[in-house]
Amino acid sequence: MLPEVIGRIRSGSISAEERIRMFLERIELDNPHINSVLHVNSNAIEEAKRIDERIKTRQAGKLAGLGIIVKPNISVKGLPISCGSKVLENYIGSFDADVISAIRREDGIILGMANCDEFASGSSGENSAFGPTQNPTSPGRIPGGSSSGSAASVAAGFCDIALGSDTGGSIRNPASHCGVFGFKPTYGLVSRHGLVDLSMSLDVIGPICKDAYGIALMMDVISGSSENDAKTIPHERIDFLRGIDDGIKGKTVGLCSIAKEMCSEKRIYDVVESTAENMKKNLGVKLIDIDIPHIDLSVQAYYPLVYVEFFSGTRKFDGKKYGKPIEEFCGEEVLRRILGGKEISRAEYEGKYYRLALKAKMAIKIAVEKAFEKVDFIVLPVTPKLPHRIGDKITDPRVIYAYDAFTIPANFAGICAISVPAGEIDGCPVGMQILAKSFNDATLLRAARVIERLGIKNA
Ligand code: GLN
């Protein structure tokens, strides 16, 4: 567990250099098969040596000696920011994103760049131009996406913490399939400066880790407003580590039974339900049934909005300033979104589809906010089905889009949500999603921490 690792690094019983060498060796050995890392930072060992000096003189920061892997749509100076695409294959980051500067300030070591679905578009990890990522926990299956390489790298033991981005579920979905924790912070709590947009009104950067403490630690480092991102919301600094073990006794948890109908694999709902019962029995929470009207419209509302925002965001990839012309070099899913977004934005439709989708988004946001008048947390499945096998022929994109049915509402509402490991079905890890109100991120992580301590009872 991360607190023990940190203790050993601080006390000098292992050095930063040793830890980083261990990760690099594992990557060298296992990555050719897992394919979750696209590029290794060749300076990582030198950086670790420098941090060891700081540890000796007791000047080291909160992440001293920890290895971090980054989704390749987040800018890291000097490393390839490919976005999992041939379009940006040779594009090297010219600056550090705000989150990367924050990690460096606290002496975290960037180990390398992860694989991901091209331009964060996907739910399976199969849309990367650099080949699919394997699920280390469930061999032969997809790891989920689009932060496929970030979650798989954590599960494979290639790093301590990884960064992903979440527009409609891309942190929580792969975390669930890989059996690790994945956190989507409140929109505006973490700077998006240096993140390549998928859909800028929904995108957020967040951490993936094997334990809840690591999520809280990374949030403590990367959260806060920034003058580089006008959408960050000035808010009193949240201390993520204080009170992390305080528990959630007396809180009310809402279970949404309509989710059962939406699950094509009913056993996933059963895992969520029995974890919620477990919380009631062992954590002193009150459990009530809630309804969230319109959540069944999430997928239909999300894709038109993302298509349009993505289309407009990709106009800068015309081959002049960044990489190659996108329409000529991108994969099938990215092209579908560009052409779809272009079509939906045409003048003769007068924003017909877009406006309708915005209306549905607003209805879902209001429904979620209303549910929070009665509860502190909402629990939902992360995905309605188990991860498919890599290479399964899925020709209808709607089958893939359906993975996002339960994760999109948190992006629409701008609130925080986490996937916590909750069980296992047919050898596949299954996560439970917990949602909390905007800026209740630290309380949500407290819930994740106590659920983690209960242990997985549904395996
Ligand atoms: N699967 C969703 C999509 O393809 C979510 C992507 C994400 O959150 N980055 O758009």
Image (spheres, helix red, strand yellow):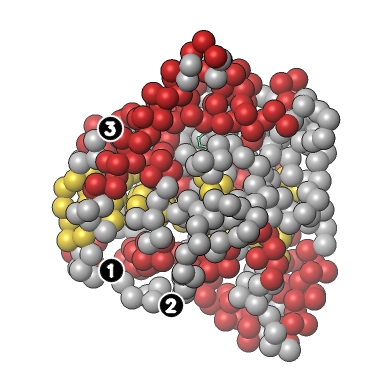
Q: Are marks 2 and 3 in contact (CB under 8 Å)?
A: no
Q: Nearer the viewer, mark 2 or mark 3?
A: 3
Cα distance between the residues tagged 1 and 3: 29 Å
> Can residue 28 be seen here?
no
Q: CA distance from mark 2 to mark 3?
A: 37 Å
When asked about the image quadrant of residue 316, the answer is top right
Tag 1–tag 3 contact (CB < 8 Å): no
Residue that carries the numbered disc 1 in the rendered image: 248
Name the kind of residue labelled 3 in the image: His
Q: CA distance from mark 1 to mark 2?
A: 14 Å
Q: Amino acid at mark 1?
A: Ile
Q: x%, y% of residue 236? A: 46, 69
Question: Nearer the viewer's eye, disc 1 or disc 3?
Answer: 3
Q: Give percent across and percent down for residue 150.
A: 60, 49
What label does residue 294 carry, if any?
3
CB atoms at circles 1 and 2 under 8 Å apart? no
What amino acid type should be assigned to the residue bearing mark 2?
Arg
Nearer to the camera, 277 or 375: 375
Residue found at the very far top of the displayed protein: 348
Q: Is any part of residue 229 visible from this angle?
A: yes
- Give the residue at mark 2: 242
> Would you say 219 lies left or right of 272 here?
right
Of 136 and 443, the residue lying toward us: 443
Mark before the other along the chain sequence, 1 or 3: 1
